[in-house]
Image: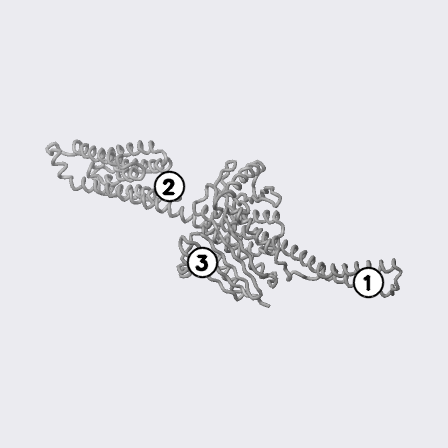
Protein backbone atom coordinates (compact mmCIF):
# COMPACT_ATOMS: atom_id res chain seq x y z
CA UNK A 1 0.00 0.00 0.00
CA UNK A 2 2.91 2.34 0.66
CA UNK A 3 5.26 3.32 -2.17
CA UNK A 4 8.64 5.02 -2.49
CA UNK A 5 8.71 8.83 -2.85
CA UNK A 6 10.88 11.47 -4.44
CA UNK A 7 11.09 14.53 -2.18
CA UNK A 8 11.29 18.14 -3.10
CA UNK A 9 9.34 21.14 -1.96
CA UNK A 10 6.44 20.43 -4.31
CA UNK A 11 7.69 17.20 -5.86
CA UNK A 12 5.25 14.30 -5.94
CA UNK A 13 6.88 12.03 -8.49
CA UNK A 14 6.54 8.33 -7.69
CA UNK A 15 3.70 9.05 -5.21
CA UNK A 16 1.17 6.55 -6.49
CA UNK A 17 -1.19 6.20 -3.51
CA UNK A 18 -4.17 8.58 -3.98
CA UNK A 19 -4.42 9.29 -0.23
CA UNK A 20 -0.72 10.12 0.06
CA UNK A 21 -0.96 12.37 -2.98
CA UNK A 22 -3.83 14.24 -1.32
CA UNK A 23 -1.86 14.64 1.95
CA UNK A 24 1.23 15.78 0.06
CA UNK A 25 -0.58 18.36 -2.09
CA UNK A 26 -2.82 19.66 0.69
CA UNK A 27 0.16 20.34 2.96
CA UNK A 28 1.89 22.64 0.47
CA UNK A 29 -1.23 24.16 -1.10
CA UNK A 30 -2.64 24.97 2.34
CA UNK A 31 0.74 26.37 3.36
CA UNK A 32 0.84 28.70 0.35
CA UNK A 33 -2.75 29.91 0.73
CA UNK A 34 -2.66 30.42 4.49
CA UNK A 35 0.75 32.10 4.33
CA UNK A 36 -0.52 34.44 1.61
CA UNK A 37 -3.50 35.52 3.71
CA UNK A 38 -1.31 35.87 6.77
CA UNK A 39 1.31 38.00 4.99
CA UNK A 40 -1.19 40.26 3.18
CA UNK A 41 -3.83 40.83 5.80
CA UNK A 42 -2.20 40.03 9.12
CA UNK A 43 -1.94 42.81 11.73
CA UNK A 44 1.51 41.78 12.94
CA UNK A 45 4.88 43.30 11.95
CA UNK A 46 6.22 42.12 8.61
CA UNK A 47 9.45 40.69 10.00
CA UNK A 48 7.54 38.52 12.52
CA UNK A 49 5.17 37.38 9.79
CA UNK A 50 8.11 36.46 7.54
CA UNK A 51 9.74 34.57 10.40
CA UNK A 52 6.56 32.59 11.11
CA UNK A 53 6.06 31.85 7.42
CA UNK A 54 9.68 30.71 6.93
CA UNK A 55 9.62 28.54 10.03
CA UNK A 56 6.38 26.91 8.99
CA UNK A 57 7.68 26.26 5.44
CA UNK A 58 10.80 24.53 6.77
CA UNK A 59 8.67 22.50 9.17
CA UNK A 60 6.30 21.51 6.32
CA UNK A 61 9.13 20.10 4.20
CA UNK A 62 10.66 18.22 7.15
CA UNK A 63 7.34 16.78 8.31
CA UNK A 64 6.36 15.72 4.78
CA UNK A 65 9.69 13.95 4.38
CA UNK A 66 9.37 12.15 7.74
CA UNK A 67 5.83 10.95 7.01
CA UNK A 68 6.80 9.66 3.58
CA UNK A 69 10.10 8.15 4.61
CA UNK A 70 8.91 6.38 7.77
CA UNK A 71 5.33 5.53 6.84
CA UNK A 72 5.75 1.96 8.15
CA UNK A 73 6.80 3.09 11.64
CA UNK A 74 3.47 3.72 13.36
CA UNK A 75 5.01 4.63 16.73
CA UNK A 76 7.14 7.32 15.10
CA UNK A 77 4.12 8.58 13.13
CA UNK A 78 2.12 8.97 16.36
CA UNK A 79 4.98 10.92 17.99
CA UNK A 80 5.42 13.21 14.99
CA UNK A 81 1.65 13.88 14.83
CA UNK A 82 1.65 14.88 18.51
CA UNK A 83 4.68 17.13 17.91
CA UNK A 84 3.04 18.66 14.81
CA UNK A 85 -0.18 19.26 16.76
CA UNK A 86 1.73 21.09 19.48
CA UNK A 87 3.67 22.99 16.82
CA UNK A 88 0.45 24.05 15.12
CA UNK A 89 -0.84 25.44 18.41
CA UNK A 90 2.48 27.26 18.90
CA UNK A 91 2.27 28.78 15.38
CA UNK A 92 -1.32 29.92 15.94
CA UNK A 93 -0.44 31.92 19.05
CA UNK A 94 1.74 34.57 17.33
CA UNK A 95 -0.46 34.56 14.21
CA UNK A 96 -3.88 35.28 15.67
CA UNK A 97 -4.91 32.22 17.68
CA UNK A 98 -8.23 30.81 16.72
CA UNK A 99 -8.65 33.61 14.16
CA UNK A 100 -5.35 32.77 12.44
CA UNK A 101 -5.52 31.56 8.80
CA UNK A 102 -3.07 28.82 9.82
CA UNK A 103 -5.91 27.04 11.61
CA UNK A 104 -6.73 25.47 8.22
CA UNK A 105 -3.11 24.45 7.72
CA UNK A 106 -3.34 22.48 10.95
CA UNK A 107 -5.74 20.09 9.19
CA UNK A 108 -2.61 18.40 7.82
CA UNK A 109 -2.18 16.59 11.13
CA UNK A 110 -5.80 15.38 10.86
CA UNK A 111 -5.23 14.08 7.33
CA UNK A 112 -2.11 12.18 8.36
CA UNK A 113 -3.88 10.73 11.42
CA UNK A 114 -6.82 9.58 9.30
CA UNK A 115 -4.50 7.82 6.87
CA UNK A 116 -2.13 6.11 9.30
CA UNK A 117 -3.89 5.75 12.66
CA UNK A 118 -7.09 4.50 14.27
CA UNK A 119 -10.30 6.48 14.77
CA UNK A 120 -9.78 6.50 18.57
CA UNK A 121 -6.42 8.23 18.24
CA UNK A 122 -7.90 10.72 15.79
CA UNK A 123 -10.74 11.56 18.21
CA UNK A 124 -8.36 11.98 21.14
CA UNK A 125 -6.03 14.16 19.08
CA UNK A 126 -8.95 16.25 17.81
CA UNK A 127 -10.40 16.89 21.28
CA UNK A 128 -6.97 17.74 22.73
CA UNK A 129 -6.13 20.09 19.90
CA UNK A 130 -9.49 21.89 19.83
CA UNK A 131 -9.88 22.33 23.58
CA UNK A 132 -6.24 23.29 24.13
CA UNK A 133 -6.31 25.78 21.24
CA UNK A 134 -9.52 27.37 22.46
CA UNK A 135 -8.27 27.73 26.03
CA UNK A 136 -4.90 29.16 25.02
CA UNK A 137 -6.55 31.56 22.58
CA UNK A 138 -9.00 32.69 25.27
CA UNK A 139 -6.48 33.30 28.02
CA UNK A 140 -3.72 34.84 25.92
CA UNK A 141 -5.42 36.72 23.12
CA UNK A 142 -8.74 38.05 24.45
CA UNK A 143 -9.68 40.75 26.93
CA UNK A 144 -10.27 39.94 30.55
CA UNK A 145 -13.87 41.21 30.49
CA UNK A 146 -14.96 38.26 28.21
CA UNK A 147 -15.74 35.06 30.04
CA UNK A 148 -15.06 31.64 28.53
CA UNK A 149 -18.74 30.94 27.84
CA UNK A 150 -19.01 34.08 25.73
CA UNK A 151 -15.75 33.22 23.99
CA UNK A 152 -17.03 29.80 22.93
CA UNK A 153 -20.40 31.27 21.89
CA UNK A 154 -18.73 33.98 19.85
CA UNK A 155 -16.50 31.44 18.05
CA UNK A 156 -18.97 28.56 18.03
CA UNK A 157 -19.54 28.74 14.28
CA UNK A 158 -15.82 28.58 13.57
CA UNK A 159 -15.23 25.76 16.07
CA UNK A 160 -18.24 23.80 14.78
CA UNK A 161 -17.17 24.25 11.18
CA UNK A 162 -13.68 23.14 12.03
CA UNK A 163 -14.90 20.04 13.87
CA UNK A 164 -17.33 19.08 11.08
CA UNK A 165 -14.63 19.50 8.46
CA UNK A 166 -12.33 17.22 10.47
CA UNK A 167 -15.09 14.59 10.74
CA UNK A 168 -15.74 14.86 7.01
CA UNK A 169 -12.04 14.49 6.27
CA UNK A 170 -11.86 11.39 8.43
CA UNK A 171 -14.89 9.83 6.70
CA UNK A 172 -13.47 10.65 3.29
CA UNK A 173 -10.14 9.09 4.21
CA UNK A 174 -11.89 5.93 5.42
CA UNK A 175 -13.83 5.78 2.17
CA UNK A 176 -10.68 6.45 0.18
CA UNK A 177 -8.88 3.61 1.95
CA UNK A 178 -11.73 1.21 1.17
CA UNK A 179 -11.76 2.28 -2.47
CA UNK A 180 -8.00 1.94 -2.65
CA UNK A 181 -8.14 -1.55 -1.11
CA UNK A 182 -10.74 -2.57 -3.67
CA UNK A 183 -8.60 -1.06 -6.40
CA UNK A 184 -5.59 -3.05 -5.24
CA UNK A 185 -7.71 -6.20 -5.07
CA UNK A 186 -9.01 -5.59 -8.58
CA UNK A 187 -5.46 -4.99 -9.79
CA UNK A 188 -4.39 -8.28 -8.19
CA UNK A 189 -7.27 -10.14 -9.82
CA UNK A 190 -6.54 -8.42 -13.11
CA UNK A 191 -2.91 -9.48 -12.82
CA UNK A 192 -4.02 -13.07 -12.24
CA UNK A 193 -6.34 -12.85 -15.26
CA UNK A 194 -3.53 -11.48 -17.41
CA UNK A 195 -1.29 -14.31 -16.26
CA UNK A 196 -4.08 -16.79 -16.86
CA UNK A 197 -4.73 -15.40 -20.35
CA UNK A 198 -1.04 -15.63 -21.09
CA UNK A 199 -1.01 -19.24 -19.93
CA UNK A 200 -4.14 -19.89 -22.00
CA UNK A 201 -2.42 -18.47 -25.09
CA UNK A 202 0.58 -20.67 -24.37
CA UNK A 203 -1.76 -23.61 -23.84
CA UNK A 204 -3.38 -23.01 -27.23
CA UNK A 205 0.07 -22.97 -28.79
CA UNK A 206 0.92 -26.24 -27.03
CA UNK A 207 -2.39 -27.77 -28.09
CA UNK A 208 -1.64 -26.71 -31.65
CA UNK A 209 1.77 -28.32 -31.33
CA UNK A 210 0.15 -31.38 -29.80
CA UNK A 211 -2.33 -31.52 -32.67
CA UNK A 212 0.50 -31.33 -35.18
CA UNK A 213 2.28 -34.17 -33.39
CA UNK A 214 -0.75 -36.43 -32.96
CA UNK A 215 0.72 -38.64 -35.64
CA UNK A 216 3.64 -39.32 -33.31
CA UNK A 217 1.20 -40.57 -30.66
CA UNK A 218 -0.84 -42.64 -33.09
CA UNK A 219 2.17 -44.36 -34.60
CA UNK A 220 3.73 -45.29 -31.25
CA UNK A 221 3.45 -49.04 -30.84
CA UNK A 222 5.59 -49.35 -27.73
CA UNK A 223 3.92 -48.72 -24.35
CA UNK A 224 7.17 -47.61 -22.70
CA UNK A 225 7.92 -45.09 -25.44
CA UNK A 226 4.37 -43.73 -25.20
CA UNK A 227 4.87 -43.01 -21.47
CA UNK A 228 7.96 -40.88 -22.16
CA UNK A 229 6.17 -38.86 -24.85
CA UNK A 230 3.11 -38.27 -22.64
CA UNK A 231 5.29 -37.09 -19.71
CA UNK A 232 7.11 -34.66 -22.00
CA UNK A 233 3.95 -33.08 -23.40
CA UNK A 234 2.32 -32.94 -19.95
CA UNK A 235 5.23 -30.89 -18.59
CA UNK A 236 5.20 -28.56 -21.60
CA UNK A 237 1.45 -27.95 -21.57
CA UNK A 238 1.09 -27.42 -17.81
CA UNK A 239 4.35 -25.39 -17.54
CA UNK A 240 5.16 -27.25 -14.35
CA UNK A 241 8.68 -27.89 -13.07
CA UNK A 242 8.31 -31.58 -13.87
CA UNK A 243 5.72 -34.13 -14.93
CA UNK A 244 5.63 -37.88 -14.49
CA UNK A 245 3.78 -40.97 -15.64
CA UNK A 246 3.57 -44.10 -13.49
CA UNK A 247 2.50 -47.30 -15.24
CA UNK A 248 2.84 -51.05 -14.94
CA UNK A 249 4.42 -53.10 -17.70
CA UNK A 250 3.04 -56.31 -19.13
CA UNK A 251 5.67 -58.13 -17.08
CA UNK A 252 4.38 -56.71 -13.78
CA UNK A 253 7.17 -54.15 -13.31
CA UNK A 254 6.44 -50.54 -12.29
CA UNK A 255 7.86 -47.80 -14.52
CA UNK A 256 8.20 -44.09 -13.65
CA UNK A 257 8.65 -41.83 -16.70
CA UNK A 258 9.59 -38.23 -15.84
CA UNK A 259 10.29 -35.06 -17.78
CA UNK A 260 11.56 -31.74 -16.45
CA UNK A 261 13.60 -30.59 -13.46
CA UNK A 262 13.59 -33.49 -11.00
CA UNK A 263 16.48 -34.90 -9.00
CA UNK A 264 17.23 -38.56 -8.26
CA UNK A 265 16.18 -38.30 -4.60
CA UNK A 266 12.76 -36.94 -5.60
CA UNK A 267 12.40 -39.69 -8.20
CA UNK A 268 13.13 -42.34 -5.57
CA UNK A 269 10.55 -40.92 -3.14
CA UNK A 270 8.05 -40.42 -5.95
CA UNK A 271 8.40 -44.03 -7.10
CA UNK A 272 7.70 -45.30 -3.58
CA UNK A 273 4.60 -43.14 -3.06
CA UNK A 274 3.20 -43.83 -6.53
CA UNK A 275 3.28 -47.56 -5.86
CA UNK A 276 1.15 -47.05 -2.75
CA UNK A 277 -1.32 -44.79 -4.59
CA UNK A 278 -1.45 -47.23 -7.50
CA UNK A 279 -2.36 -50.19 -5.28
CA UNK A 280 -4.91 -48.11 -3.32
CA UNK A 281 -6.67 -46.91 -6.48
CA UNK A 282 -6.55 -50.36 -8.03
CA UNK A 283 -8.47 -51.82 -5.09
CA UNK A 284 -10.98 -48.95 -4.88
CA UNK A 285 -14.58 -49.44 -5.98
CA UNK A 286 -14.48 -46.40 -8.26
CA UNK A 287 -11.41 -45.47 -10.29
CA UNK A 288 -12.83 -42.61 -12.33
CA UNK A 289 -11.68 -38.99 -12.02
CA UNK A 290 -9.43 -39.45 -8.97
CA UNK A 291 -7.32 -36.41 -8.04
CA UNK A 292 -4.70 -36.79 -5.28
CA UNK A 293 -2.57 -34.06 -3.74
CA UNK A 294 0.66 -35.10 -2.05
CA UNK A 295 3.95 -33.74 -0.76
CA UNK A 296 7.14 -35.18 -2.29
CA UNK A 297 10.32 -33.89 -0.63
CA UNK A 298 8.75 -30.48 0.08
CA UNK A 299 7.29 -30.35 -3.45
CA UNK A 300 3.53 -30.15 -3.92
CA UNK A 301 2.36 -32.60 -6.57
CA UNK A 302 -1.09 -33.36 -7.94
CA UNK A 303 -1.82 -36.86 -9.26
CA UNK A 304 -4.62 -38.04 -11.54
CA UNK A 305 -5.72 -41.58 -12.35
CA UNK A 306 -5.57 -42.71 -16.00
CA UNK A 307 -8.88 -44.52 -16.58
CA UNK A 308 -10.98 -45.48 -19.56
CA UNK A 309 -14.35 -47.15 -19.05
CA UNK A 310 -13.30 -49.06 -15.97
CA UNK A 311 -9.79 -49.87 -17.18
CA UNK A 312 -7.03 -48.43 -14.97
CA UNK A 313 -3.71 -47.83 -16.73
CA UNK A 314 -1.64 -45.84 -14.23
CA UNK A 315 -1.06 -42.40 -12.71
CA UNK A 316 -0.10 -39.03 -14.13
CA UNK A 317 1.15 -36.09 -12.06
CA UNK A 318 2.80 -32.68 -12.10
CA UNK A 319 4.49 -30.43 -9.57
CA UNK A 320 2.16 -27.60 -8.50
CA UNK A 321 3.55 -24.17 -7.70
CA UNK A 322 2.17 -23.27 -4.25
CA UNK A 323 2.49 -19.55 -5.09
CA UNK A 324 0.12 -19.83 -8.02
CA UNK A 325 -3.26 -18.11 -7.80
CA UNK A 326 -6.35 -20.30 -7.46
CA UNK A 327 -7.38 -19.58 -11.04
CA UNK A 328 -4.03 -20.94 -12.27
CA UNK A 329 -4.30 -23.97 -9.99
CA UNK A 330 -7.80 -24.75 -11.30
CA UNK A 331 -6.51 -24.40 -14.84
CA UNK A 332 -3.73 -26.89 -14.14
CA UNK A 333 -6.25 -29.34 -12.65
CA UNK A 334 -8.38 -29.01 -15.78
CA UNK A 335 -5.31 -29.57 -17.94
CA UNK A 336 -4.21 -32.71 -16.13
CA UNK A 337 -7.76 -34.13 -16.30
CA UNK A 338 -7.76 -33.51 -20.04
CA UNK A 339 -4.31 -35.07 -20.44
CA UNK A 340 -5.19 -38.16 -18.39
CA UNK A 341 -8.29 -38.67 -20.55
CA UNK A 342 -6.15 -38.39 -23.68
CA UNK A 343 -3.54 -40.75 -22.23
CA UNK A 344 -6.22 -43.29 -21.28
CA UNK A 345 -7.50 -43.27 -24.86
CA UNK A 346 -3.97 -43.82 -26.17
CA UNK A 347 -3.38 -46.74 -23.80
CA UNK A 348 -6.79 -48.15 -24.67
CA UNK A 349 -5.88 -47.92 -28.35
CA UNK A 350 -2.69 -49.88 -27.72
CA UNK A 351 -4.67 -52.46 -25.78
CA UNK A 352 -7.30 -52.84 -28.51
CA UNK A 353 -4.59 -53.06 -31.15
CA UNK A 354 -2.83 -55.72 -29.11
CA UNK A 355 -6.08 -57.66 -28.82
CA UNK A 356 -6.72 -57.20 -32.54
CA UNK A 357 -3.19 -58.30 -33.36
CA UNK A 358 -3.52 -61.38 -31.19
CA UNK A 359 -6.91 -62.00 -32.74
CA UNK A 360 -5.46 -61.72 -36.22
CA UNK A 361 -2.60 -64.04 -35.39
CA UNK A 362 -4.92 -66.57 -33.74
CA UNK A 363 -7.41 -66.33 -36.56
CA UNK A 364 -4.70 -66.74 -39.15
CA UNK A 365 -3.28 -69.73 -37.30
CA UNK A 366 -6.74 -71.26 -37.08
CA UNK A 367 -7.40 -70.58 -40.75
CA UNK A 368 -4.13 -72.19 -41.78
CA UNK A 369 -4.76 -75.16 -39.51
CA UNK A 370 -8.27 -75.64 -40.91
CA UNK A 371 -7.18 -75.36 -44.52
CA UNK A 372 -4.24 -77.69 -43.97
CA UNK A 373 -6.54 -80.14 -42.27
CA UNK A 374 -9.21 -79.90 -44.95
CA UNK A 375 -6.89 -79.82 -47.96
CA UNK A 376 -3.22 -80.60 -47.57
CA UNK A 377 -3.71 -83.16 -44.80
CA UNK A 378 -6.20 -85.11 -46.90
CA UNK A 379 -3.86 -85.12 -49.87
CA UNK A 380 -0.97 -86.31 -47.74
CA UNK A 381 -3.14 -89.02 -46.20
CA UNK A 382 -4.14 -90.19 -49.67
CA UNK A 383 -0.50 -90.15 -50.77
CA UNK A 384 0.54 -92.14 -47.71
CA UNK A 385 -2.13 -94.75 -48.40
CA UNK A 386 -1.11 -94.97 -52.04
CA UNK A 387 2.54 -95.52 -51.13
CA UNK A 388 1.52 -98.25 -48.67
CA UNK A 389 -0.54 -99.98 -51.35
CA UNK A 390 2.28 -99.82 -53.87
CA UNK A 391 4.69 -101.20 -51.30
CA UNK A 392 2.52 -104.25 -50.67
CA UNK A 393 2.05 -104.79 -54.40
CA UNK A 394 5.80 -104.72 -55.00
CA UNK A 395 6.36 -107.15 -52.11
CA UNK A 396 3.72 -109.50 -53.55
CA UNK A 397 5.32 -109.21 -57.02
CA UNK A 398 2.08 -108.07 -58.57
CA UNK A 399 2.14 -106.56 -62.02
CA UNK A 400 1.85 -102.76 -61.85
CA UNK A 401 2.80 -99.77 -63.96
CA UNK A 402 5.25 -98.42 -61.39
CA UNK A 403 6.21 -95.39 -63.48
CA UNK A 404 2.59 -94.29 -63.86
CA UNK A 405 1.88 -94.80 -60.18
CA UNK A 406 4.95 -92.80 -59.16
CA UNK A 407 3.93 -89.97 -61.50
CA UNK A 408 0.50 -89.97 -59.87
CA UNK A 409 2.12 -89.70 -56.46
CA UNK A 410 4.41 -86.89 -57.72
CA UNK A 411 1.45 -84.91 -59.02
CA UNK A 412 -0.38 -85.35 -55.72
CA UNK A 413 2.66 -84.21 -53.72
CA UNK A 414 3.15 -81.23 -56.04
CA UNK A 415 -0.50 -80.22 -55.61
CA UNK A 416 -0.20 -80.58 -51.82
CA UNK A 417 2.93 -78.38 -51.76
CA UNK A 418 1.21 -75.76 -53.93
CA UNK A 419 -1.89 -75.78 -51.74
CA UNK A 420 0.22 -75.51 -48.60
CA UNK A 421 2.11 -72.51 -50.01
CA UNK A 422 -1.14 -70.78 -50.98
CA UNK A 423 -2.61 -71.46 -47.55
CA UNK A 424 0.36 -69.94 -45.73
CA UNK A 425 0.81 -66.83 -47.87
CA UNK A 426 -2.80 -66.00 -48.76
CA UNK A 427 -4.73 -63.23 -46.94
CA UNK A 428 -7.18 -65.06 -44.74
CA UNK A 429 -8.05 -62.22 -42.30
CA UNK A 430 -11.65 -62.20 -43.51
CA UNK A 431 -12.20 -65.88 -42.66
CA UNK A 432 -12.17 -65.43 -38.89
CA UNK A 433 -12.74 -68.42 -36.68
CA UNK A 434 -15.70 -68.19 -34.37
CA UNK A 435 -14.00 -69.64 -31.30
CA UNK A 436 -11.07 -67.19 -31.47
CA UNK A 437 -13.44 -64.23 -31.65
CA UNK A 438 -15.43 -65.50 -28.67
CA UNK A 439 -12.27 -66.11 -26.61
CA UNK A 440 -11.08 -62.54 -27.26
CA UNK A 441 -14.36 -61.07 -26.01
CA UNK A 442 -14.35 -63.26 -22.91
CA UNK A 443 -10.75 -62.27 -22.12
CA UNK A 444 -11.63 -58.58 -22.43
CA UNK A 445 -14.69 -59.02 -20.18
CA UNK A 446 -12.62 -60.87 -17.57
CA UNK A 447 -10.15 -57.98 -17.39
CA UNK A 448 -12.97 -55.47 -16.86
CA UNK A 449 -14.47 -57.63 -14.10
CA UNK A 450 -11.16 -57.77 -12.23
CA UNK A 451 -10.33 -54.06 -12.63
CA UNK A 452 -13.82 -52.68 -11.93
CA UNK A 453 -15.10 -55.14 -9.32
CA UNK A 454 -18.26 -55.93 -11.29
CA UNK A 455 -19.96 -59.13 -12.37
CA UNK A 456 -20.46 -59.49 -16.13
CA UNK A 457 -22.53 -62.35 -17.59
CA UNK A 458 -21.65 -62.95 -21.25
CA UNK A 459 -23.73 -65.16 -23.55
CA UNK A 460 -22.72 -65.74 -27.18
CA UNK A 461 -25.00 -67.67 -29.53
CA UNK A 462 -25.17 -68.12 -33.27
CA UNK A 463 -22.82 -68.32 -36.18
CA UNK A 464 -20.18 -65.63 -36.79
CA UNK A 465 -18.58 -67.20 -39.87
CA UNK A 466 -20.14 -64.48 -42.00
CA UNK A 467 -18.84 -61.62 -39.85
CA UNK A 468 -15.78 -59.89 -41.32
CA UNK A 469 -12.85 -58.60 -39.31
CA UNK A 470 -13.87 -54.90 -39.32
CA UNK A 471 -17.36 -55.68 -38.04
CA UNK A 472 -15.88 -57.81 -35.25
CA UNK A 473 -13.81 -54.82 -34.17
CA UNK A 474 -17.02 -52.73 -34.08
CA UNK A 475 -18.74 -55.37 -31.94
CA UNK A 476 -15.82 -55.40 -29.50
CA UNK A 477 -15.86 -51.60 -29.29
CA UNK A 478 -19.63 -51.47 -28.70
CA UNK A 479 -19.28 -53.98 -25.85
CA UNK A 480 -16.45 -51.87 -24.38
CA UNK A 481 -18.52 -48.65 -24.64
CA UNK A 482 -21.58 -50.32 -23.09
CA UNK A 483 -19.63 -51.75 -20.16
CA UNK A 484 -17.83 -48.45 -19.65
CA UNK A 485 -21.11 -46.50 -19.46
CA UNK A 486 -22.64 -49.01 -17.06
CA UNK A 487 -19.62 -48.89 -14.75
CA UNK A 488 -18.68 -45.22 -14.97
CA UNK A 489 -22.06 -43.48 -15.15
CA UNK A 490 -24.50 -46.18 -14.07
CA UNK A 491 -22.48 -47.30 -11.01
CA UNK A 492 -23.52 -50.85 -11.89
CA UNK A 493 -22.41 -53.98 -10.08
CA UNK A 494 -23.99 -56.52 -12.43
CA UNK A 495 -24.01 -56.44 -16.23
CA UNK A 496 -25.37 -58.94 -18.73
CA UNK A 497 -24.32 -59.09 -22.37
CA UNK A 498 -26.06 -61.20 -25.00
CA UNK A 499 -24.57 -61.56 -28.48
CA UNK A 500 -26.55 -63.29 -31.26
CA UNK A 501 -25.35 -63.86 -34.81
CA UNK A 502 -26.80 -65.40 -37.97
CA UNK A 503 -26.40 -64.98 -41.70
CA UNK A 504 -28.31 -61.70 -41.83
CA UNK A 505 -27.62 -59.64 -38.73
CA UNK A 506 -25.89 -59.30 -35.37
CA UNK A 507 -27.92 -58.53 -32.23
CA UNK A 508 -26.31 -57.15 -29.06
CA UNK A 509 -28.21 -56.61 -25.79
CA UNK A 510 -26.44 -54.96 -22.82
CA UNK A 511 -28.31 -54.72 -19.49
CA UNK A 512 -27.15 -53.31 -16.16
CA UNK A 513 -28.56 -52.76 -12.66
CA UNK A 514 -27.21 -49.21 -12.33
CA UNK A 515 -28.83 -45.94 -11.30
CA UNK A 516 -30.37 -45.33 -14.73
CA UNK A 517 -31.17 -41.95 -16.28
CA UNK A 518 -33.91 -39.94 -17.99
CA UNK A 519 -33.19 -40.45 -21.70
CA UNK A 520 -35.61 -37.78 -22.93
CA UNK A 521 -34.15 -35.18 -20.56
CA UNK A 522 -30.65 -36.06 -21.77
CA UNK A 523 -31.75 -35.66 -25.40
CA UNK A 524 -33.59 -32.41 -24.64
CA UNK A 525 -30.58 -30.92 -22.85
CA UNK A 526 -28.14 -32.31 -25.42
CA UNK A 527 -26.21 -33.97 -22.57
CA UNK A 528 -25.88 -37.53 -23.80
CA UNK A 529 -22.54 -39.03 -22.79
CA UNK A 530 -19.68 -39.71 -25.17
CA UNK A 531 -20.14 -43.48 -24.86
CA UNK A 532 -23.75 -43.44 -26.10
CA UNK A 533 -22.87 -40.99 -28.86
CA UNK A 534 -20.02 -43.27 -29.97
CA UNK A 535 -22.30 -46.34 -30.04
CA UNK A 536 -24.96 -44.42 -31.95
CA UNK A 537 -22.35 -43.23 -34.47
CA UNK A 538 -20.99 -46.75 -34.96
CA UNK A 539 -24.47 -48.23 -35.43
CA UNK A 540 -25.53 -45.50 -37.87
CA UNK A 541 -22.36 -45.97 -39.93
CA UNK A 542 -23.40 -49.62 -40.44
CA UNK A 543 -27.07 -48.77 -41.15
CA UNK A 544 -28.08 -50.52 -37.96
CA UNK A 545 -30.49 -49.56 -35.18
CA UNK A 546 -30.13 -48.86 -31.48
CA UNK A 547 -32.78 -48.80 -28.74
CA UNK A 548 -32.12 -47.51 -25.21
CA UNK A 549 -34.45 -48.11 -22.27
CA UNK A 550 -33.53 -46.63 -18.90
CA UNK A 551 -35.40 -45.95 -15.65
CA UNK A 552 -34.08 -44.13 -12.62
CA UNK A 553 -32.84 -46.60 -9.97
CA UNK A 554 -33.81 -49.52 -12.22
CA UNK A 555 -30.91 -49.78 -14.63
CA UNK A 556 -30.45 -49.47 -18.39
CA UNK A 557 -30.95 -51.79 -21.37
CA UNK A 558 -29.29 -51.12 -24.74
CA UNK A 559 -30.35 -53.20 -27.77
CA UNK A 560 -28.50 -53.01 -31.08
CA UNK A 561 -29.06 -54.60 -34.50
CA UNK A 562 -26.21 -54.66 -37.03
CA UNK A 563 -27.00 -55.95 -40.52
CA UNK A 564 -24.49 -58.16 -42.35
CA UNK A 565 -23.55 -56.81 -45.77
CA UNK A 566 -22.77 -59.66 -48.17
Quarter where residue 465 is shown: bottom right
Q: What x and y, as percent, mark residue 349?
A: 57, 54
Residue assigned mark 3: 528
Q: What x and y, as percent, mark residue 405?
A: 84, 64
Residue assigned mark 1: 409
* Closest to the observer, 557 or 264: 557
Of the image marks 1 and 3, the number of the one nearer the N terminus: 1
Closer to the observer: label 3 or label 2?
3
Quarter the N terminus occupies: top left
Mark 1 Cα shell of 10 Å, populated few (<14), some (14-19), many (≥20): some
Q: Secondary structure at mark 1?
A: helix
Q: What x and y, as percent, mark residue 559?
A: 48, 60
Of the image marks 3 and 2, the number of the one nearer the N terminus: 2
Residue 550 visible in the current orientation: yes
Closer to the observer: label 1 or label 2?
1
Q: What x and y, as percent, mark residue 530?
A: 48, 57
Residue assigned mark 2: 1
Mark 2 Cα shell of 10 Å, populated few (<14), some (14-19), many (≥20): few
* Closest to the observer, 346 or 134: 346
Amino acid sequence: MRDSFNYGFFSSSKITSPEMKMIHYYRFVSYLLTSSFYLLWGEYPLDSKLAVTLFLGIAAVILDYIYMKHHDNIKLIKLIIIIETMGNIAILLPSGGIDSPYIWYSLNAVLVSSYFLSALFILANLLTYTVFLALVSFYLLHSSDMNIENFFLENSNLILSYVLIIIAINLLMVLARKINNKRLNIEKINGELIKSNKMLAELLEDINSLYQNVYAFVTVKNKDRLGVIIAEYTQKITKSAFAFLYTKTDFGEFVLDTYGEIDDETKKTLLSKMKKHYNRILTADVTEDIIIKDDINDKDVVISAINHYGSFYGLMGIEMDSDNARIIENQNLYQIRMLTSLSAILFERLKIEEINQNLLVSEEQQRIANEIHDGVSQRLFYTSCKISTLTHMVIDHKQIDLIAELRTLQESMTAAIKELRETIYSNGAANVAETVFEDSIRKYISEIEVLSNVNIDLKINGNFDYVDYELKKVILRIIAEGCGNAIRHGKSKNISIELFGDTEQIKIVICDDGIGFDLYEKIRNNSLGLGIRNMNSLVNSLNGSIDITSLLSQGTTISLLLPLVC
